[in-house]
């Protein structure tokens, strides 16, 4: 805990007060940042009523600051939130019924899920659980071709018949209209939507081609359909805003979206799907900020929590992808680019048919949780193994608020090991080794898929569980060092307080890059104007608005695009030629030298305008208290840790409390650093120092 | 010997990670979409003697042929093989892969001056020379016409390029720069494996490493043998027919289960042909292994241990094991895919094995690939479009309908290949797609029905004509159902003429011209159903009706379901109709080959427990009974079908060439097994477990 401060007293009146809150699946984390002073709190998430948990955690922050909730909230100039509400609705497929009116003959597109098939519990390949039932899809006669020529105009009467069937017979609560090639010529789609609105003026009606004017009907349609589907998930945010205002908050809250920026409540209400990756995006955004303070803008950001391990390659900014899967559904939603695998503290150890030890991806989750939680879980998990081996101090878990049961952890490991003739401790050692291997494999996969040199990329470790594995993963992949930010376990909450508003508009052109100057210029101007208007609507002051434009480029007929920044003067033919060159350079950088297809046409698939609205944000400031550089940190105690496989590998390992660490401190492994809700393992032959921002920088001793 | 249950799994995980890294390297450096997008490549890691220990990539059939290639390299070069050598081979007659268009690149892994393994990558090249672009040519009459044929030769010798061999490749293939870059990508991938595996071997010590690989395989082999041991000893037979032009080429397969071994014998296959339908034994074996893995070992890593207890025999000189000069440029397709017969045999065996866990995983049908490639002339230049869909309606299984538009019903991996959007097809090709929807052709009915494929209609748009080459392995003979489920539907193409006439387009037709205003309707295939369709639950039939999968008339004809005026099933009328249909079946059926009455079998019914012979057929003593009715079917050693009335009907989509034959329960008319065979062919399958054949000849007198 970073200690309390007297916010109400206003000693740090110059710095704005910022609160960031990450409403996770299990815990709601909060960070209050006020200049160099940072306070955080954690309460259990209240799934039935998100506001309750958020107000509870705010009250906890106020208590830590020695002030009242209303006084605290009144002093806040930035309030940011991330939420799993939308993710939950998608994961549980519990959204509202949405009807789809589409081009006749193509009604099967959504149900067939673009060929995506997933395993069921028994190993069969099955369709992903549907969002739109086949009977909620109606085809109407209409057609536009690839040139935008209307081959068949749409009939308002036919559309209204379809709408009546969907609303009156099938009881859908929203309608999406999505036609082939509507991004190129929206006339049929617009007329159809107008016909539906005329019939049902109060019904929510979306035109998919206007909402996301990009090529690929599946991804375009799924953005509109999913967005309409999750609309009710954000009702809780309206409620939260009004309860926060009633409790004294004077600024509108901002909500973290999947693209790594914040948006207003109004925008989130309009585009709730954008919140689907809210929490992870906040974490990666904050990781990028931490990396910048550590002078390492390029890092491998690794987040390990209770159920998953996530890796993102941060290179100065939040990495994003404009197309991909969201809970088994392909969409064109722009979201943070992370690889997620099922490996976390709750991952369960098991024995497969070959009679070897395995770990995950099945997780004990929060309920029943690891055996050591004492909530009825009886399978040995990664957390249980860490307790048995001594890496985790059962008495100090979550700052001592949730003591763990060593005996239950030991018994669970013993039961599992019994079937392999291993004792409890050796089994625990095996679970930890295998979990490390799984995570290492995920990081390596990200490295090899992007062709990056791991020797240039430090690992940035965050999330409650990553610190115990990061050094060994870094060794295995050859990363030079590990950065553990002071706020490692609450980085997503910090991200909610620390990001600017980001808005995005995209349009598909699908034309050769060179030779379409006028079209490019016209489109860029239109996108720029739209994004500036979006920023204004989100309350961003004129002087704080900035827009950059990117082109999604590829060689003709390739499947995947690269994003390249567009020059300021896209009206200049020579600038587009240079852009094509830049694409070729980037292509060979990403995909290796000597892979270029000479003379291949560069295709401009999409233009994308990204607007940034500068906001009041929490900053990572240098710490005010320092110790002389090289001061050894003083251990607060010693823990017996089983570091190797043999029973004789148990040694006393010094433990340092994170709160005792100041910039200038140095540490030598083997050593454990205990923070309130995370523990960091510094192996033997490793050393660490605390940088001016409080980040722990660990590296192998030379 | 005891095997370390932790170290073995860590080693497996590391090798799998290396295979994945190598795959990423290939995808990054190769450029052909067939590799980078369709993912037609695989990475294999082998021990020093060519036993597979790990694999990566999507196409598992590549792995067993990679082993074959390593053995060919070892045989040809033996002790001369040195570190840094990289070999290439493509000729299936000389150690090559699934067909000549695939190349296999292999590199030995050396550590401490000893060969400790092999790094092998196989991939489909866009061209390897020969009569037609793409190296698929139906009318080749010998292998000399089929393009560049490479036995194992060195691309690099001790790390140095053998420029002569690269020169030979360059002047013999079309698209030489692309092929060269793809080849360099494969070499780069083997380098990744070589370096990383060598590092592991060096760390562990070469002896320890070799022992680890042996352990990995031994664990898998032990479990495989245990699972095979649980299959009832005996003989299990199935026959299929390969279609080429007007011919049906008969492919019989006999599986002998003996203890912990499976031996598949294709004795009786036709002699090799002077067309591209031939294949080689190792190709058939590779395909068989993928089925064995799918049916028996989906949860086990695909290593040599899976294959060790399995043998495949194809007579030399037959079309399944052709010798030069037989053409083999589609070795993977026609005959290779006929290995699905082996899957039928294996399913018969598992069905007859009491308590075998695999009994829950049996499903109807096999592989139903359809495809065509279309040529256009745009501005005087040739242009090609592949219109294939490599997914189909999957077979049903006990308790579940088949999955719509999928690959295998069960698999160890999720399939990441996706179907292409209509807008992308239309963007890149001068075509207009009129519909792409569920294939509503009624087939694959059953108590649980097959999944559906798609129907896609398309024609030229903006050009005068398109000309097609039809591929695909079946167009008359359908995939089969199980347990009385109906056969599915082969893939079908129809040409709709401007004058309104429609003609069927058969598999392997060449030069099919489609003029402006005409269009092709392509239906992907559908596998078989499971169980008698007259036993399908009314609710399930209603669902299919509501979702437009079947029409009211189909409900009556196939499922015996009578609907009320509001379209819902009438339970009483349906029960009556179902009873009528059963009676009618018996009245139309041919009498049993060897009719039995309960009193005939009393003296042979000396068993105590029912042992399964087939789904719904049990053996008690020396007598086979229909399980549901208790009607006796046969006395050992006669085949259980001998007591079944036999109903024969033409299979309409074959236009008079194929008969659907149902073996009925003599007491009730319930279908026990339904097969489809070319007219005049006898029963296509046999279930002859030893315990059945040994039960007879039974004592004739007590």
Image (spheres, coloured by chain):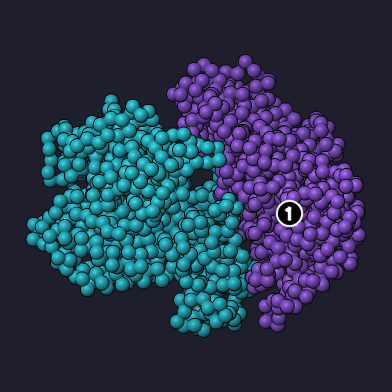
Chain colours: A cyan, B purple
Which residue appears farthest toward the front when viewing the image? B702
Residue at the image position 68 percent from the left and 25 percent from the top: B72
- Residue at image coords 70%, 76%: B571
Q: Kindly indicate the quadrant of the structure image that contains residue B281.
A: top right
Q: Foreground: B399 or A94? A: B399
Residue A10 visible here: yes
- In this view, the residue in front, B566 or A297, is B566
Residue drawn at point x = 27 percent, y = 64 percent: A54
Task: Give above or below for B73 relative to A197.
Answer: above
Looking at the rendered structure, the secondary structure element under dot 1 is loop
Residue A85, given in percent of the width and then of the height, sits at: 38, 64
Instruction: Answer with left or right where residue A78 lies relative to residue A590.
Output: left
The chain ID associated with circle 1 is: B
* Left/right of residue B403 with respect to residue B586 in the rendered view: left
Q: Position of residue B343 (x, y in %)?
A: 72, 45
Query: Going by the image, does A265 lie left or right of B576?
Result: left
- Give the class, few, some or many, for how many residues have Cα within 10 Å of label 1's Cα (few <14, many ≥20): many
> Where residue B468 sits: x, y (%)?
75, 53
Q: Residue A293, image x and y in percent?
A: 24, 44
- B382 in relation to A696, above or below: below
The residue that mark 1 highlights is: B615
* Residue B499 at least partly seen: no
Which residue occupies 91% across, 54% down?
Answer: B593
């Amino acid at each position: 805990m970073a200690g309390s401060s007297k916010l109400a007293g206003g000693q740090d009146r110059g710095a704005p007060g910022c609160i960031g809150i990450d409403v996770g699946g299990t815990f709601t984390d909060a960070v209050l940042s006020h200049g160099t002073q940072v306070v955080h709190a954690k309460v259990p998430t209240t799934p039935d009523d998100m506001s309750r948990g958020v107000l509870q955690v705010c009250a906890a922050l106020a208590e830590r600051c020695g002030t009242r909730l209303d006084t605290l909230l009144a002093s806040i100039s930035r309030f940011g939130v991330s939420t799993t509400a939308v993710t939950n609705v998608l994961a549980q497929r519990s959204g509202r019924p949405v009807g789809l009116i589409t081009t006749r003959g193509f009604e099967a597109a959504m149900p067939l899920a673009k060929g995506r098939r997933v395993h069921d519990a028994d190993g069969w390949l099955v369709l992903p659980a549907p969002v739109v039932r086949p009977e909620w899809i109606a085809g109407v006669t209409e057609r536009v071709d690839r040139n935008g020529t209307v081959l068949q105009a749409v009939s308002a009467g036919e559309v209204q018949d379809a709408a009546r069937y969907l609303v009156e017979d099938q009881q859908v609560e929203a309608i999406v209209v999505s036609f082939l090639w509507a991004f190129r010529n929206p006339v049929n789609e617009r007329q159809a939507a107008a016909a539906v609105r005329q019939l049902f003026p109060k019904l929510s009606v979306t035109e998919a081609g206007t909402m996301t004017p990009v090529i690929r009907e599946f991804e375009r349609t799924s953005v509109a359909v999913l967005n309409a589907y999750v609309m009710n998930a954000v009702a809780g945010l309206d409620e939260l805003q009004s309860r926060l205002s009633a409790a004294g908050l004077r600024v509108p809250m901002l909500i973290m979206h999947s693209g790594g920026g914040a948006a207003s409540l109004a925008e989130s209400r309009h585009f709730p799907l954008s919140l689907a990756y809210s929490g992870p995006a906040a974490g990666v955004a904050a990781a990028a900020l931490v990396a910048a303070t550590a002078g390492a803008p390029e890092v491998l950001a690794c987040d390990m929590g209770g159920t998953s391990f996530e890796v993102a390659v941060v290179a100065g900014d939040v990495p994003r992808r404009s197309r991909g899967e969201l809970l088994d559904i392909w969409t064109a939603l722009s979201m943070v680019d992370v690889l997620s695998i099922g490996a976390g503290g709750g991952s369960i150890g098991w024995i497969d048919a070959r009679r070897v030890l395995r770990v995950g991806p099945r997780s004990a989750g929060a309920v029943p949780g690891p055996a050591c939680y004492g909530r009825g879980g009886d399978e040995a998990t990664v957390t249980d193994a860490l307790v048995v081996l001594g890496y985790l101090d059962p008495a100090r878990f979550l700052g001592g608020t949730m003591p763990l049961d060593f005996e239950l952890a030991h018994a669970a490991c013993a039961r599992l090991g019994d079937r392999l003739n291993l004792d409890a401790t050796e089994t625990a050692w095996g679970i930890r080794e295998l979990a490390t291997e799984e995570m290492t494999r995920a990081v390596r996969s990200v490295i090899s898929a992007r062709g990056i040199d791991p020797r240039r990329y430090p690992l940035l470790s965050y999330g409650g569980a990553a610190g115990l594995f990061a050094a060994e993963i870094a060794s295995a992949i050859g990363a030079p060092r590990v950065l553990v930010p002071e706020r490692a376990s609450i980085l997503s909450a910090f991200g909610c307080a620390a990001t600017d508003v980001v808005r995005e508009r995209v349009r598909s052109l699908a034309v050769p890059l060179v030779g379409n100057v006028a079209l490019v210029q016209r489109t860029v101007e239109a996108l720029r104007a739209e994004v500036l208007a979006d920023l204004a609507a989100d309350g961003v002051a004129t002087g704080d608005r900035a827009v950059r434009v990117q082109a999604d480029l590829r060689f003709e007929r390739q499947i995947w695009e690269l994003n390249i920044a567009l020059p300021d003067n896209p009206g200049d033919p020579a600038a587009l030629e240079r852009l094509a060159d830049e694409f070729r350079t980037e292509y060979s950088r990403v995909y290796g030298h000597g892979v270029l297809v000479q003379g291949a046409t560069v295709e401009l698939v999409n233009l994308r305008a990204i607007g940034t609205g500068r906001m009041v944000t929490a900053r990572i400031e240098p710490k005010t208290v320092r110790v002389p550089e090289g001061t050894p940190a003083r251990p607060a105690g010693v823990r017996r840790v089983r570091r190797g496989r043999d029973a004789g590998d148990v040694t006393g390992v010094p433990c340092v409390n994170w709160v005792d660490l100041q910039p200038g401190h140095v540490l030598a492994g083997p050593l454990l650093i205990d923070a309130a809700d995370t523990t960091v393992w510094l192996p033997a032959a490793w050393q660490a120092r605390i940088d001016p921002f409080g980040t722990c920088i660990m590296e192998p001793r030379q | 010997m005891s095997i370390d249950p932790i170290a073995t799994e860590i080693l497996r995980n590391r090798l799998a990670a290396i295979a994945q890294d190598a795959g990423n390297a290939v995808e990054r450096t190769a450029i052909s979409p067939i590799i980078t997008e369709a993912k037609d490549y695989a990475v294999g890691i082998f021990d020093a003697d060519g036993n597979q220990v790990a694999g990566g990539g999507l196409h598992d059939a590549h792995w067993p042929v990679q082993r074959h290639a390593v053995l060919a390299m070892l045989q040809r070069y033996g002790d001369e093989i040195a570190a840094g050598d990289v070999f290439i081979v493509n000729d299936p007659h000389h150690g090559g892969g699934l067909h000549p268009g695939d190349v296999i690149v292999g590199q030995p892994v050396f550590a401490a001056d000893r060969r400790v393994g092999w790094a092998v990558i196989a991939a489909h090249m866009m061209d390897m020379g020969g009569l037609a672009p793409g190296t698929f040519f139906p009318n080749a009459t010998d292998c000399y016409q089929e393009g560049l044929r490479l036995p194992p030769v060195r691309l690099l010798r001790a790390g140095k390029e053998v420029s002569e061999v690269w020169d030979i490749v360059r002047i013999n293939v079309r698209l030489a720069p692309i092929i060269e870059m793809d080849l360099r990508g494969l070499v780069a991938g083997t380098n990744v494996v070589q370096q990383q595996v060598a590092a592991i071997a060096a760390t562990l010590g070469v002896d320890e490493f070799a022992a680890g690989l042996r352990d990995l395989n031994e664990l898998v082999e032990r479990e495989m043998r245990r699972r095979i041991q649980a299959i009832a000893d005996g003989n299990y037979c199935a026959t299929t027919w390969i279609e080429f032009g007007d011919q049906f080429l008969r492919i019989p397969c006999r599986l002998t289960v003996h203890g912990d071994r499976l031996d598949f014998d294709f004795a009786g296959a036709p002699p090799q042909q002077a067309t591209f339908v031939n294949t080689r034994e190792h190709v058939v074996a590779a395909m068989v292994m993928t089925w064995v893995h799918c049916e028996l070992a989906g949860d086990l890593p695909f290593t040599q241990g899976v294959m060790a207890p399995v043998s495949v025999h194809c007579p030399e000189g037959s079309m399944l094991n052709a010798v030069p000069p037989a053409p083999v440029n589609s070795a993977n397709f026609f005959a290779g895919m006929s290995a699905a017969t082996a899957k039928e045999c294996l399913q018969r065996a598992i069905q007859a094995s009491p308590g075998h866990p695999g009994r829950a995983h049996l499903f109807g049908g096999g592989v139903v690939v359809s495809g065509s490639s279309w040529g256009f002339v745009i501005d005087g230049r040739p242009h090609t479009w592949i219109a294939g869909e490599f997914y189909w309606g999957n077979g049903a299984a006990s308790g579940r309908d088949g999955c719509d538009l999928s690959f295998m019903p069960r698999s160890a991996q999720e399939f990441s290949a996706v179907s292409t959007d209509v807008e992308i097809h239309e963007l890149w090709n001068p075509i207009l797609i009129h519909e792409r929807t569920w294939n509503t052709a009624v087939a694959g009915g059953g108590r649980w029905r097959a999944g559906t494929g798609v129907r896609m209609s398309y024609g030229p748009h903006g050009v005068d004509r398109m000309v097609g080459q039809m591929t695909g392995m079946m167009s008359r003979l359908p995939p089969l159902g199980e347990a009385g489920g109906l056969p599915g539907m082969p893939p079908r193409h129809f040409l709709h003429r401007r004058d309104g006439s429609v003609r069927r387009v058969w598999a392997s037709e060449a030069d099919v011209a489609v003029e402006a205003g005409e269009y092709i309707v392509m239906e992907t295939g559908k596998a078989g159903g499971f169980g008698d369709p007259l036993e399908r639950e009314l609710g399930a039939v209603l669902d299919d009706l509501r979702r437009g999968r079947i029409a009211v008339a189909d409900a009556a004809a196939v499922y015996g379901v009578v609907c009320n005026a509001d379209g819902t099933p009438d339970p009483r009328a349906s029960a009556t109709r179902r009873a009528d249909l059963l009676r009618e079946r018996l009245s139309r059926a041919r009498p049993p080959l060897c009719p039995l009455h309960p009193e005939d079998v009393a003296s042979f019914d000396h068993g105590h427990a029912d042992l399964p012979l087939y789904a719904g057929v049990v053996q008690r003593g020396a007598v086979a009974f229909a399980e549901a009715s208790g009607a006796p079917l046969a006395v050992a050693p006669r085949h259980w079908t001998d007591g079944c009335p036999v109903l024969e009907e033409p299979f309409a989509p074959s236009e008079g060439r194929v008969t659907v034959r149902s073996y009925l329960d003599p007491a009730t008319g319930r279908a026990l097994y339904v097969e489809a065979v070319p007219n005049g062919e006898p029963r296509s399958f046999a279930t002859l477990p030893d315990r059945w054949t040994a039960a007879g000849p039974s004592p004739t007198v007590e």
